[in-house]
Amino acid sequence: MQIDESYEWELKRRYITDVSGQVTIDGNTQPGGRANAPKIMVNTNRDNLPTFGVSLEVRTSNNVIRNLGFIGGGQIILYEGNNLVENNWMGLKANGSGLSLASTASTQAARSLARGGIILPNEDSDNNIIRGNRIIGAFERAIRITSGGDNNLIEANYIGMDSQGHVPAPHDTGVNCARELDYNASLWYGGRGIQVTGDNNTVTNNRLVGLHVPQSTNDTPPITMEIAGVGNTVTLNVIGRDLAGKDAGVCGQGMLLQGTELLVENNLIVHTRNGFDPGDDGTDFDSAILTQSFAAGSGRWITVRKK
């Protein structure tokens, strides 16, 4: 399905105080088609524009967006709360084998990979569920909660891999983290990971592998998880190991933890890089987790334990 990027694409309010929503967009409601992948692939960049495709802007609450495939660079942006976004593909080719570029119109456009991502941008972005999505090549973040979104659940998403949760050979035993500014088709670009601010959000049972983006020599590699705010919980996530058990790793730090009263428990982190030099992997210059608490006092620190 082609989206005309010259028009707005949004679930919008009927009037300024109306946030009722209650719209369901479900690709599986269509008859026929394949059973184990999205039946509908949505191309948000019909004309291959170097400025990328239009985003789906959700300005109401209590909506469901599931079982769709998105290519062309558009994002899903949740401005309100109590929405469910699940089992979607973002940035994958129709057959799920790897990255679909948002635009091939120029070298500069190709640097932004699939662009895409699921964004919760403001203080009303509360109580949303982001679950079971498969995202690759996100140039900004695959999933991002900023500006005070609270009580959201980010669960069981696969980021940086193909549709089967794998990084294919020859990248499966160690992603090449070469610093090249332009897109190189011979490299694996899983994109960027998860960023969370706000309070009392839960990030659980996600798998992030193969994260890498085009970058100059001195750019910082993409941090897999950036967690700030108060009272956020990060549990049972796997970083660097794909579903086939291969340690493909990531090209940046595993976790950067900031804020207070965070609980980080039972996460598996392997094959990360903290420094600028790919040779830092596994050395004293490498660090899977860095933490900093912004408030002093009993019970205000960050708790990191197990695995």
Image (cartoon, grey):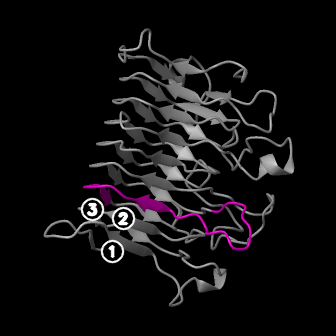
Are the two marked residues, 1 and 2, in contact with CB atoms closer than 8 angstroms? no
Question: Which label was assigned to residue 307?
Answer: 1
1 lies above or below 78: above
Rendered location of residue 104, percent (x, y): 83, 43
Q: Is 228 part of what is drawn in magenta?
A: yes
Describe the element under mark 3 as helix, strand or loop: loop
Rendered location of residue 54, percent (x, y): 66, 29
Describe the element under mark 2 as helix, strand or loop: strand
At label 1, which amino acid type do we have? Lys
Furthest toward the left, the residue is 298
82 lies above or below 273: above
Residue visible at 60% across and 40% down in the picture = 90
Residue nearer the viewer, 187 or 4 = 4
Callout 3 crowding tier (Cα within 10 Å): few <14, some 14–19, many ≥20? many
Q: Is 287 part of what is drawn in magenta?
A: no
Q: Quadrant of residue 56?
A: top right
Rendered location of residue 101, percent (x, y): 74, 45
* Residue linked to disc 3: 262
At label 3, which amino acid type do we have? Leu
Residue visible at 45% across and 34% down in the picture = 85
Residue nearer the viewer, 222 or 306 = 222
100 lies above or below 166: above
* Mark closer to the chain start, 1 or 2: 2
Callout 1 crowding tier (Cα within 10 Å): few <14, some 14–19, many ≥20? few
Predominant secondary structure in magenta? loop
* Residue linked to disc 2: 258
